[in-house]
Image (tube, grey):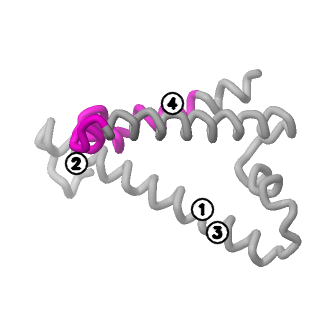
Amino acid sequence: MKSVLKVVFVIIGTIIGAGFASGQEMYVFFFSFGKEGFFGILISSILMGGVIYQALKILNKYQIKNYKEFLEILLSKNKNSRIKNIINLLVNIFILVTFFIMIAGFGAYFEQEFSINSLIR
């Protein structure tokens, strides 16, 4: 149960805390399409909820502790270890780039709000 809570908090922090998809940005994007935009919000929410639910089911069923174990389960039908390594590398690159983007956003926020020189950050 403790590991499931950790995963849930990571998901919530990623979606809400990162600020990449703030409420204003979602509003501008989806509602620029009028009534169809409401269905876009509904469909994307259902898809995101479904994907997160399925991932949590897999995590709980196999007692997975890290994303490498998760990838092993997802790619278990693929016997080619080269493809598994490439996908693992792509996930690592994505995580690293996302981390750098969040750090840059954090630094820009400090510069904007507190007038901290960009060389210091």
Find numbered disc 3 in the image and state the secondary structure of the residue it sits on: helix
| Mark count | 4
> Which numbered mark, 2 or 4, is in the foreground of this view?
4
Labels 4, 3: front one: 4
In whole angstroms, how far apart are the C-alphas of marks 4 and 3?
25 Å
Which residue is farthest left? 115
Assess whether residue 112 is covered by the magenta stretch: no
Image quarter of residue 9: top right
Q: CA distance from mark 1 to mark 2?
A: 24 Å
First of labels 1, 2 by sequence position: 1
Which amino acid does the dot numbered 4 rest on?
Ile
Q: Which numbered tag is attached to residue 89?
A: 3
**What's the mark number on residue 27?**
none
Which residue is pictured at 19% across the width and 54% down the height? Answer: 118
Task: Tell me if mark 2 has few (under 14), some (14-19) or many (20+) residues whose alpha carbon lies within 10 angstroms of its own.
Answer: some
Question: Dot 2 lies on which element?
Answer: helix
Circle nearer the N terminus (4, 3): 4
Residue that badge 2 annotates: 108
